[in-house]
Image (tube, rainbow, N blue to C red):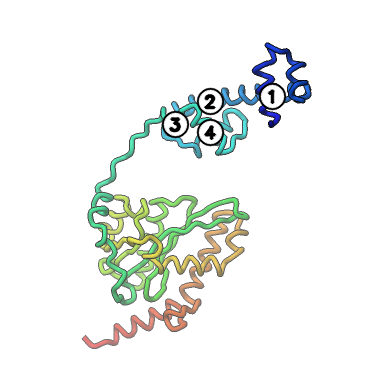
Amino acid sequence: MTIDEKVELVRKNRKKYGLNRCCEALALSKGTWHYRIHKKDSVDEQEEYLKEVLRSLIIDNPGYGYRRLKPEVEARTGIRVNHKRLLRILREANLGLTRNVVKSEPSEVQRIIAENSGDLDVVNGHDWESLEVFSTDFTELRYAGGTKKAWLMATVDIVSKWAPGWAIGSSRNRVLARECWQKTCRSFDDLDVDTKKVIVHHDKDAVYTSYDWLRTILIDSSACISYSEMGAKGNPWVESMWGRIKTELGSLITEAQTLEELRNIIDRHMDYYNHKRRHSTINYRAPMTYLQNHIKEENAAPY
């Protein structure tokens, strides 16, 4: 029999037989009894307090799950609560049942994407020339010793490996995506790349299915869009670039102390990546060297 079981038996029978006789019969010291019973009462009181706080928080924030409730509870009560304990309290008090979060209806874009599943990827399985298809995505960068997080988005030509645009910010959102695309377009102007002949390939991230992004690419730039239907596996070009960047920069990213310092590190590396780094897939040439040769060959070709 465990101590907790002995304490419970004493609790149930002490009025009938007396505390001393119960403790003696169960070989339980009175000191242990008093410690356990007061500790349990304290825990019970705390649990009831947490339940009341949670009820209030859920009324104010009906869309919150346990991950968002946890910091709110700790901020309001000063009591540190781990996820397991929080989930148990929510379950025992049936607090999760009081929440009624209405699911948002899929947007028209999401409906169209769902209806055309299987025909969204126009890139994979075809041969392309330089400056025709540009792969893009976001990647997370941890800096300041891993305590801070930033997001990097970039575009990369799937043939020449040229990265015409990139942007870094504290959030993975449409603002960052527009900043990246604007820089890409400025680089396009320098090489006389016609956006009407460009395909932008990415996954079905919420940013890339937003009206704002689609208007920027399809209407403002008259470019085309292709969606990977296999996530990262269907978009290997930018994923490969992420791997190289993180491997080659290594601790430089982690040791950056500010977002501005991180931007400077990435800017310098992207300049190196485009103008000096030799890529095996383009016969160990730098992307800009490869493109200059490609443009010369196109200009020299008879019409």
The numbered mark, 1 or 3, whose residue comes first in the sequence reads 1
Question: SS class of the residue under badge 2?
Answer: helix
Asked if residue 153 shows in the view, the reply is yes
The residue carrying mark 1 is: 7
Alpha carbon distance from label 4 to label 3: 11 Å
The residue carrying mark 4 is: 88
Alpha carbon distance from label 1 to label 4: 23 Å
The amino acid type of the residue labelled 4 equals Arg
Q: Judge left or right: residue 56 versus residue 196.
A: right
Between marks 4 and 3 in the image, the one whose residue lies nearer the viewer: 4
Q: Residue furthest front?
A: 25
- At label 1, counting other C-alpha atoms closer than 10 Å, the crowd grade (few under 14, some 14-19, many 20 or more) is many
Labelled pair 4, 3 in contact (Cβ < 8 Å)? no
Which x, y percent locates residue 188?
35, 68
User: Residue 165 falls in which quadrant of the image?
Assistant: bottom left
Screen quadrant of the N terminus? top right
The amino acid type of the residue labelled 2 equals Lys
Alpha carbon distance from label 4 to label 2: 11 Å
The amino acid type of the residue labelled 3 equals Gly
Alpha carbon distance from label 1 to label 3: 32 Å
The numbered mark, 4 or 2, whose residue comes first in the sequence reads 2
Which x, y percent locates residue 294?
35, 82
Q: Check residue 295 in the rendering and tell me which mark sits there, or answer none.
A: none
The numbered mark, 4 or 3, whose residue comes first in the sequence reads 4
- At label 2, counting other C-alpha atoms closer than 10 Å, the crowd grade (few under 14, some 14-19, many 20 or more) is some
Q: Judge left or right: residue 105 versus residue 158.
A: left
Q: Is residue 159 above or below residue 122?
A: below
Which x, y percent locates residue 53?
53, 25
The residue carrying mark 3 is: 96
The amino acid type of the residue labelled 1 equals Val
User: Residue 133 falls in which quadrant of the image?
Assistant: bottom left
The residue carrying mark 2 is: 51
